[in-house]
Image (spheres, rainbow, N blue to C red):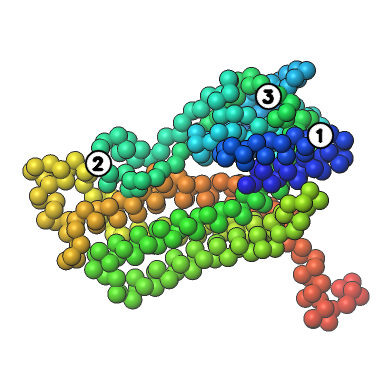
């Protein structure tokens, strides 16, 4: 969503300014993706190396994806894209610049669509805590027995891209607007974390019920707090979409300020929601014996005796809910709910920088001065 919309409007702007045909190419590409129902991974984040330096200043020039050769029929790309969630589930990748560029970074100003199985692409799978449990049999210790996610480092080793799938090549001046538009879409899209939050709130409420304390006032208060934080994220994300404005290309751009506020809320609130979920779950969430111990002829009956909650709830149901809370707050799915919430679509400082650019303090000061009756001459005096 973020990649398609931002590239759509930026290619329109580049064509208008430079007489290129990127927008026509991109429209043809999108139509093909829609006709075939393909999944696209938007690949923006580069490894970056020394963060104090730009792409062309790096000791190793391949720490940002770049054009290494321009052939009559297309480009050859080299570099890598990091933290690519869902890339192994995608059919195509759309690589984009990850930051503002200068004239010296011209070769890094490239947007291109690449099939995930193109020659020269290597995927190095990210490892996560507790991921060996998926290999141990059973369906309880994984925490979430039905779904999972993955991230990978995508390495491009002289990957050829025909010009029909190139949508920016050297127009470095447009990298900043592309990044800003993409991040607005992407940061607004972090409203998705509220769906995960709903599951975690439900898990916390369920385990409190299984433990026999659902009616305690402090339990209800903590669930209210979790819900308040979750809905605050949701409200900012929906508001960013509602306040969208139409671009020259004809699509809609979400409100930049509200999109950044949404994502900045996401860098904080899931951590507090997770803390409260762990509070409600209790210490057994991290000290619970494994499936193998429950299946063991000697220890299994003992555990079935001592791992009971309130009457009417099976030990297995209690185990499953504890493992789900663990999975979401410090296990494999905490990658997507916590760390990705902090660093995905830009770390917290990236949103603060953008909020500072957009907050229009001078206009707010003028409102206050008008109400206070402060004149310009009074200030000078």
Please determine whether, in this image, residue 93 is positioned above or below residue 186: above
Q: Residues within 10 Å of mark 1 (few under 14, many from 20)?
A: some
Residue 302 place in picture, x, y as percent: 10, 51
Residue at x-position 69% and y-position 26%: 66
- Cα separation, mark 1 vs mark 2, equals 54 Å
Would you say 295 lies left or right of 103 here? Answer: left
Residue 293 place in picture, x, y as percent: 17, 43
The mark closer to the camera, 3 or 1, is: 1
Which residue was labeled with disc 1?
21
Quarter of the image holding residue 8?
A: top right
2 or 3: tag closer to the N-terminus:
2
Q: Report helix, strand or loop for mark 3.
A: strand
Quarter of the figure with the C terminus: bottom right
- Cα separation, mark 2 vs mark 3, equals 44 Å
3 or 1: tag closer to the N-terminus:
1
Would you say 284 lies left or right of 144 here? Answer: left
Which residue was labeled with disc 3?
161
Residue at x-position 21% and y-position 53%: 316
Residue 239 shows in the view? yes
Which residue was labeled with disc 2?
138
């Amino acid at each position: 969503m973020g990649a398609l919309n931002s590239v759509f409007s930026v290619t329109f702007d580049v064509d208008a300014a430079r007489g290129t045909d990127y927008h026509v190419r991109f429209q043809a590409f999108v139509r093909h993706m829609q006709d075939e129902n393909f999944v696209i991974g938007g690949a923006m984040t580069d490894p970056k190396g020394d963060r104090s330096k730009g792409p062309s200043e790096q000791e190793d020039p391949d720490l940002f994806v770049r054009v290494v050769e321009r052939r009559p029929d297309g480009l050859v790309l080299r570099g890598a894209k990091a933290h690519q969630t869902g890339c192994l589930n995608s059919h195509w990748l759309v690589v984009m610049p990850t930051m503002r560029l200068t004239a010296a970074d011209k070769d890094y100003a490239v947007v291109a669509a690449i099939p995930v199985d193109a020659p020269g692409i290597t995927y190095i799978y990210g490892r996560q805590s507790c991921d060996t449990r998926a290999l141990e049999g059973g369906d309880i210790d994984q925490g979430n027995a039905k779904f999972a996610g993955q991230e990978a480092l995508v390495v491009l080793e002289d990957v050829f891209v025909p010009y029909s799938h190139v949508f920016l090549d050297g127009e470095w001046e447009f990298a900043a607007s592309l990044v800003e538009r993409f991040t607005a879409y992407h940061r607004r899209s972090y409203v998705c974390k509220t769906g995960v939050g709903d599951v975690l709130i439900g898990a916390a409420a369920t385990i409190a019920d299984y433990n026999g304390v659902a009616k305690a006032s402090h339990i209800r208060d903590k669930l209210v707090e979790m819900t308040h934080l979750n809905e605050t994220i949701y409200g900012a994300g929906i508001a960013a979409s509602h306040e969208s404005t139409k671009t020259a290309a004809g699509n809609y751009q979400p409100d930049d300020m509200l999109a950044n506020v949404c994502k900045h809320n996401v860098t904080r609130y899931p951590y507090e929601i997770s803390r409260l979920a762990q509070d409600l779950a209790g210490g057994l969430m991290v000290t619970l014996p494994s499936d193998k111990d429950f299946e063991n002829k000697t220890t299994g009956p003992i555990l079935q005796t001592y791992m009971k909650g309130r009457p009417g709830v099976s030990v297995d149901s209690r185990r499953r809910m504890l493992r789900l809370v663990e999975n979401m707050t410090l296990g494999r799915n905490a990658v997507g709910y916590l760390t990705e919430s902090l660093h995905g679509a830009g770390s917290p400082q990236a949103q603060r920088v953008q909020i500072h650019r957009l907050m229009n303090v001078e206009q707010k000061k003028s409102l206050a001065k008008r109400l206070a009756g402060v004149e310009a001459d009074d200030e000078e005096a």
